[in-house]
Image: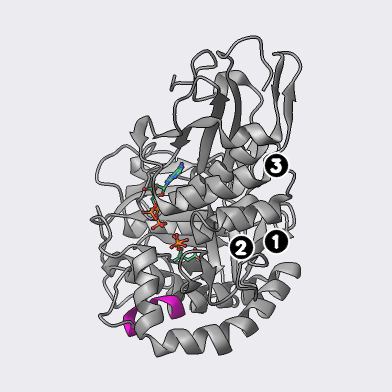
Amino acid sequence: MAGESQNWVLMVTAQTPTNIAVIKYWGKRDETLILPVNDSISVTLDPSHLCTTTTVAVSPSFQKDRMWLNGKEIALSGGRFQSCLRELRKRACDVEDKKKGIKISKEDWSKLHLHIASYNNFPTAAGLASSAAGLACLVYSIGKLMNVKEDESQLSAIARQGSGSACRSLFGGFVKWIMGKEEDGSDSLAVQLADEKHWDDLVIIIAVVSSRQKETSSTSGMRESVETSLLLQHRAKEIVPKRILQMEEAIRNRDFASFSRLTCTDSNQFHAVCLDTWPPIFYMNDTSHRIISIIEKWNRSEESPQVAYTFDAGPNAVLIARNRQTAALLLQRLLYYFPPTSGDLDSYIIGDKSITKDAGINGIQDVEALPPPPEIKDNIPSQKFKGDVNYFICTRPGRGPVLLSDESQALLNSENGLPK
Ligand SMILES: Nc1ncnc2c1ncn2[C@@H]1O[C@H](COP(=O)(O)OP(=O)(O)OP(=O)(O)O)[C@@H](O)[C@H]1O
Ligand SMILES: C[C@@](O)(CCOP(=O)(O)OP(=O)(O)O)CC(=O)O
């Protein structure tokens, strides 16, 4: 290891998106390597609205590996973090920073310690897939720091060992996680089906539904489903392989009718598997069901589907509108049924606020003046559900991980490698 003194700090900062599955991953065939029972497909969400930023630093002065998440130190002792660190160290290569006069040889990495600081620009552990963006960012940034030569797909197989869904966050656009066949998991990795520009009409609105912390984590929920649900076995063997092919075709042809049908039925089947688990698991709540029925009613009243819905292991609805015009109509419906409890629209609709303008909403008075959606039959009085949605995030399909070269965006101090 060459360097004038032992006080140098070398660091890298990266930003990684989160993703939402449209064909769900639910069930592992290997718990430690995190190998799934079926392929899955996701849409990467625009990191301008939902992303993780991670800085990793290395210095001979660091005494041990340390990590800070959203400003608080967390333990890195968990098996999943350790698997990722071990796999990355195995693949580390020589690194030279001529400007700083630092040279790290391949062999040095096993003796050097890391400091990692990460920040999610959205709530952590709130059903918005922070673990997917977080673990993908950890692997991507350390991979860059250690000059790991593997491509994104091979890195995805490492991120997979941090959290299954994280492997799909190594790419932008539309991503498939191939389940693979090998026992060592070497062929269980993510590939990009199409980038985010391929289908840039799509607009995504997430309804963050008020709820208590979920009772069953994805990890334990899917373990229980594998052990007890016969529907899961049937789904993995018979249903998903066909759906994957149909979904790939729908994405290739930008066929919204097919994309929407597959997305909704796959989400519904995943929640049916949860219900088929013993004891049953409930992730959706009354508000989630209400949102499904609003969308179903609207889609049925039109000639072709306007919006797709999908729900992960929690009550939040992820709604995918076929284009901006539809997204504006969707937002009007959502605000009609779920008006904010306060007049503060700015914090009620976050992300791409231009959709709010397109919907003709400039203030709370416009929300109050919204007419009932035309698909409601006149004889059924329409009810409103103020307070049942915490807030909405307007976003779209987005790009994959990037390095941030501007040092001012680093989360660690370049002098001592501690959080800024
Ligand atoms: N930026 C990050 N860097 C590293 N690890 C993270 C990061 N963000 C979250 N995690 C890990 O993910 C855990 C949260 O995962 P959890 O599955 O409970 O919630 P979620 O991913 O936000 O929600 P869900 O899985 O329901 O969509 C955290 O406790 C932490 O271990
Ligand atoms: C419902 C899901 O979001 C499940 C995600 O599960 P995780 O990736 O969080 O589980 P672990 O691999 O145990 O970390 C569906 C999906 O993202 O495909």
Q: Position of residue 414 (x, y in %)?
A: 55, 16
Q: In front of the other: label 1 or label 2? A: 1
How many residues crowd mark 1 within 10 Å: few (<14), some (14–19), many (20+)? Answer: some
Q: Which residue is mark 1?
A: 191
Labels 1 and 2: the sequence-earlier one: 1
Q: Amino acid at mark 3?
A: Val
Q: Position of residue 31 (x, y in %)?
A: 45, 68
Asked which quadrant contains residue 365, the reply is top left
Give the spatial CA distance, label 2 vs label 3: 39 Å
Res. 71 mark: none
- Viewed as shown, does residue 283 lie left or right of 203? left
Q: In front of the other: label 2 or label 3? A: 3
What secondary structure prevails in the magenta region? helix
Q: Which residue is mark 3?
A: 148
Q: Is residue 124 above or below residue 98?
A: below
Give the spatial CA distance, label 3 vs label 1: 18 Å
Labels 3 and 1: the sequence-earlier one: 3
Whether residue 93 is visible, yes or no, is yes
Range covered by the magenta-colored residues:
269-276
Whether residue 172 is visible, yes or no, is no
User: Which residue: 66% across, 60% down?
Assistant: 174
Q: Position of residue 297 (x, y in %)?
A: 43, 76
User: Which residue: 38% across, 55% down?
Assistant: 127
- Viewed as shown, does residue 59 lie left or right of 74? right
Q: Is residue 310 magenta?
A: no
Q: Nearer the viewer, residue 384 or 69?
A: 69
Secondary element at image label 3: loop
Q: Which residue is mark 2?
A: 322
